[in-house]
Amino acid sequence: MRSSITSSPIPPLLRCSFLSPRYLCYQSRTVDNNKPISESPISESSSADKPVSDHELPHQEDPSSPEPNSGNFSQSISQTTDFTQAHVINTLLSRKTDPYSALKYYNWAERMRGFVKGVDAFCVLLHILIGFPETYSRVRNLLNQCVSGDTCPSPSVFIDHLVECAKRFDFESDSRVFNYLLNSYVRANKIIDAIHCFDKMTECEIYPWVPFMNILLTALVRRNMSMEARELHNKMVLKGVFGDRATVHVMMRACLKEERVEEAENYFIEAKARGIELDAAAYSIFIQAICKKPNSRMASGLLKEMREMGWIPSEGTFTCVIGACVKQGNMIEALKIKDEMVSCGKPFNLVVATSLMKGYCVQGNLDSALDLFDKINEYGLSPNKVTYAVLIEWCSKSGKMEKACELYNQMKLIGIQPNVYVVNSLLRGLLKFRPFQDALKFFDEAVYCGVANIFTYNNLLSWLCSAGKVNEACGIWDNMSSKGVIPNTVSYNNMIFGRCRAGAMDMAHNLFVEMFEKSLKPNVITYSILIDGYFKKGDVERGFDVFDQMRAVNIAPTDFTYNTIINGLCKVGRTSEARDMLKKYIEIGFVPICLTYNSIIDGFMKEGDTNSALAVYSEMCEDGISPNVVTFTCLINGCFKSNNTALALKIRNDMTSKGIELDVTAYGALIDGFCKGRDMVTASGLFSELLEVGLSPNAAIYNSMIGGYRNLGNMEAALALHKRMLDDGIPCDLLTYTTLIDGLLKEGKLLVASDLYSEMLSKGIVPDIITYTVLINGLCNKGQLDNARKVLKEMDRKRVAPSVLIYNTLIAGQFKEGNLQEAFRLHDEMLDRGLVPDDITYDILVNGKLKGSSKLAGASCV
């Protein structure tokens, strides 16, 4: 391929400048562009020489000397002029039609003393050689040698001289020499020079051939110079050179290296639109690109297109598409392509197997994932660390801790060392689903093995602080320091949360200050935790101080922060202020959610302001925010507290009309309301309905029902519910036993009450002041004063301080039995304990009995 070369005028200084002083030369006279230089009387040889290698040339024989029949070339070398560049160029030009002779002469001249090597002479030689196909290889070799040396001129200078020489000496310019030069820079690993060469060529309107352009592009991409590759390619596109399918390959790879998936996709689509014949490799690269998005639908379509063209996609291509399908949750398509892959003779590999396992896990089908894991041996595959990591993570998330531990031990037995990701997954599962001691033992093992990192410690700190085990968390914190594990912001957030939850705001603040001392920057979560802590402590002003401090350091509040403030104000009985604050926050861009309105509705309901709560509920609906089951539960609770049963039922009907199903908490609110209203018929109906819809009543609901039956004196029904709780495996709590004991004592069933009390103690449930009050009141009412006094002594042993109510009950019981001396002794004992008698105490002492006996009995009820 030949092309004419056009060049802008080149300054004389630029034409004579070189990278090394070796290349500097002095030109004593001007040269006619169309005539040989006349400084030497040497003329062209009469016959062409055969190709001769450098070592075949005699050292002192002038290859420009004529054959015997040439007549004019009898001068010896000593008689000729010095070897100036003009002399060499003139001799080369005389052999313009004899490339081997010109090359032989140039090689000989290079070895002669006095020869000053110049770029122009070299360029003339290149132009002579490039004019003949048989010497193309000689041009490549000469350029490779020149460029790989230390004295090669800069690309700009080299190209300027090539262009100028072609113009001056009337060579039919061939762009091949420029392309060879470009390729030589790439071969010599002089990539920056190659880019400069490319730029200079295009500046001179000499456009690199597509194969050589592809070589440069490939070299750039391999060296992670993808941006330079894209710029170079864009320059060619602007000149109308789009390249071929190999260009498409390399440019897509360049984009994928920098995660520029859209650009890679565009290269493929544009090439296809221009009619470039794309091959299977281009399709494979494109499929890999769109799988990164991922776009499994398009990838599957292209895979099908490849098959229709008679191509068999590679194993890697199949694997990419299966992975994309799994990521997008399309397991049916993933399994279909897996079958197609196997039918094409491609092996079912471990990457595909692991991807499918993860896909099953994400869909909640852990059993299928485990079944596939058990079958991979049939395909000759052995699970690796990633396979185990996927299964252990999802077994731990699903609560299948026995299987998770089995897999963990299995991977260790076959020599795969679990990494910190696997350890942390298993630790989170143990903390959530197994006794804490199991998790702690595993944590200690991870620390001992050196696997535990800051995330491992943070997992344990988070669980301990959320569970209120701050002292244990402090022990882990100290262990971190001893092991050289440096706490990060998340670590401090966990500890601050634990202190806030325990109400130790001073300690929480100290940790906050310590963060600055450790050069850690608190984030919005840190500030929000502190704000929430102060609000829950009732210290609203300090909470707002922290909020102002957060904004002062340019940390923007999140929705979580705003919701924390609104909820905090509602919890301390400042719901109207919270409502006003909400309007203010909305003006600055805060978008409230259902949770926000629920806090305000619940606040108003707890304050007994049903009208305001309903007004906020209406605002919420008008703003397009759909209420959820929590919203209605708050409203129902409030209605029952204000004895508005009719409104509670209306709200329940609104739930049904909006298609919102009641959850256990909502049923619990309704059942509790009707139980406290002594409407056990409706409460029992709701209890049955709860079971019919497939929900399981919790201890709170059972306690409401038991309390309701106790209030009606139906202890048979209450005890039946207690038995059902035990049968269903629902743990009875202190409230359950206290309510039952209270009802049984009122009915005089002291033996059954005593048995329940013993059962309660055997389960490790510790009585509180209410339980002791119920016991003493029930025993005194039945004349069991000695047993009542034993209960009082038990309180002393367990360091539970008796209340005024308990002493009033004991004093009244002694008066009732006529034991006045013991009654007054109890009064003195009461004073000795620092208890202040109330009006009921004096009524008993003065009148010998309690005026209105129901006051004492009612005070002791649960």
Image (tube, rainbow, N blue to C red):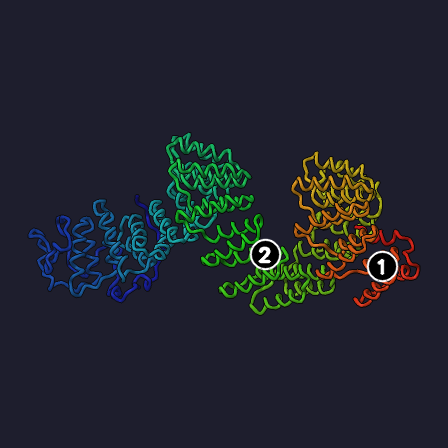
Callout 1: 10 Å neighbours few (<14), some, many (20+)?
many
* Alpha-carbon span between mark 1 and mark 2: 50 Å
- Residue found at the far bottom of this picture: 517
> Which element carries disc 1, helix, strand or loop?
helix
Residue in the picture at 33% in, 50% down: 5
Whether residue 231 appears in this view of the structure is no
Please, what is the three-letter code of the amino acid marked with disc 1? Ile
Relative height, residue 693 to residue 588 (above, below): above
The amino acid at mark 2 is Ser
Q: Secondary structure at mark 2?
A: helix
Determine the residue positioned at 63% across, 68% down: 510
Q: Is residue 620 above or below residue 43?
A: above
The answer to which of 395 and 356 lies nearer the viewer is 395
Residue 323, horizontal then vertical, whole percent: 47, 40
477 and 295: which is toward the camera: 477
Query: Which quadrant of the view contains residue 501?
Result: bottom right
Quarter of the image containing the N terminus? top left
The answer to whether 702 appears left or right of 394 in the picture is right
Name the mark on residue 826: none
Q: Nearer the viewer, mark 1 or mark 2?
A: 1
Count the marks. Answer: 2
Query: Which of 564/712 is in front?
Result: 712
Say which residue label 2 marks.
462
Q: What residue is shown with label 1?
A: 811
Which sits in the foreground, 372 or 111? 372
Locate residue 846, reporting x and y percent.
92, 61
